[in-house]
Image: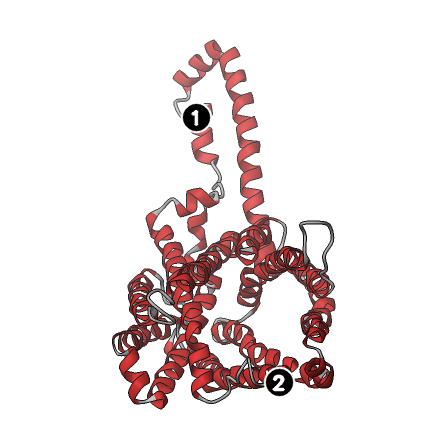
Amino acid sequence: IGCLLGQLVLGRLGDKIGRTTVYSASLMIAIITTIASAFANSMVKGFNVFVVLFIWRVLLGFGIGGDYPLTATIVSEYASPSQRGKMIAAVFSCQGFGNVLAPIVGIIVTACFKGAIDNDVRNLDYVWRLIIGLGCIPGVATLYWRLTMEDSKRFQLETAKAAAANADEDMLREKLLAKRQQFASDEPQQEEARVESPMLDTPELLAEQQKPRRAKTFMQYFGEWRHLKVLLGTSIAWFALDVAFYGINLNSAVVIDAIGFAGNLYTDKPSHFIIRNCLGNIIINILGSVPGYWIAVFTIERLGRKTIQLMGFGMLTILYIVLGFAYHKILDKSVAGFIVLFTLAQLFQNFGPNVTTFVIPGEVFPTRFRSTAHGISAAAGKLGAIVAQGGFMQLKDRGGKNAFIDHLLEIFALFMLIGFVVTFWIPESKGRTLEEICDESEEYY
């Protein structure tokens, strides 16, 4: 929820105030709220540690949410057309390393407190606080560079141009009003002059000849279907992806158990149980997730964004149909086969729409609206995550433990098909300048 709000609010502010100003602010919010989360405690009656932690995590999500549109926009505006997609994808794909590093940190901290945890499980209170608190280190390490960054020349020029166009319109309106007043007071003389010189400009003719182009508002620009369908395409595709992306993780526990890293909560020592689950998560990420990210990075400039997204959605549709309609048969006959299909799904999520839904909105919108439109697209994705976690999590045990997962996978296949279809609304941006992709002259009227 916090992430969704941050994407919308900070994305919009990135266009209004400036990219780097809001970019720095979003990181500072994330750092402060991460530290606050680590020190969360019961404050007053009715506000136990979980309520306080929830509040800080929502605010943390707000700060992280701003990173989505602003990171993509800043990289897009600084990069050359031949490297732009690769650079945006590479920045986004670093979260794959983060997904691996997080359980590694969990293993290290747990190992440091192993004896204390096994003697008294309440000592885990120190462990989770340390793990959360250590999460602010990468943010602190990069804060200086964010504070010293400048907005791209493209953004500075475009905002100045739009402001000048609107200022010219206001100035012309004042001149026209003064001309009309003068014309009304001198009407008899003007009539005689018009007979002698028919080419004399009236205020209306003067306005028509000198009328400058005025910058369109966000609503005016996206009020046209040819522009709105691109925004809908990026938003619906990201929403459809995240429904399945977060929903498929419902099967992570099944895979971790299948590869023998689940442990037993009742018989294992607490430290052993935690460490084995962390190792299982590392293996899952290394199997399909991380390779998928970097295959996308190294092929995006050759294959194109749209091609990778269509291929990814197409393969995921097929994989989810197979997993959904044969879920119990596959698990009963071949756990290894299930792991292979699960890994392929992870691979084509990242060598597919998980990367491209982040890259494309950073390229296909005009400079003045780029951060806002990317934020809207990203927020649509987070809405899909909320639907998956808040809605489908409640359905998976309908009829018994994990009894409804096969039907959920069938539903995810439908969402993948929707993502495949709406991708056709999005233009291919490979090898083209940002001005060529969205024709920024259409921002004016």
Among the 4 quarters of the image, the one containing residue 331: bottom left
Position of residue 271 in the picture relative to residue 389 (left or right): right
321 to 201, vertically: above or below: below
> In terms of secondary structure, where does tag 1 sit?
helix
Q: Residue at x 44, y 73 (%)?
A: 249
Q: Label 2, on which residue? A: 269
The mark nearer the N terminus, 2 or 1, is 1
Residue situated furthest front in the rendering: 267
Q: Please indicate whether residue 319 sits to the left or right of residue 276 in the image.
A: left
Position of residue 415 relative to residue 442, above or below, is below
Residue 201 visible in the displayed image? no
Picture quadrant of residue 406: bottom left
Tag in front: 2 or 1:
2
Q: Which residue is mark 1?
A: 204
**Marks 2/1: CA–CA distance:** 86 Å
Identified by mark 2, the residue type is Lys
Residue 56 percent across, percent down from the top left: 66, 58
Query: Picture coordinates of residue 143 (x, y %)?
Result: 72, 67
Q: Decide if residue 168 is on the left or right side of residue 350.
A: right
Three-letter amino acid code at the position of disc 1: Glu
Element at label 2: loop
The part of the image, by quadrant, that contains residue 29 is bottom right
Left or right for 310, reference 218 = left
Question: Is residue 198 in sight in this rendering?
Answer: yes
Query: Within 10 angstroms of label 1, few (less than 14), some, or many (20 or more) residues?
Result: few
Relative to residue 111, is residue 29 depicted above or below? above
Q: In the depicted view, which residue is nearer to us: 388 or 175?
A: 388
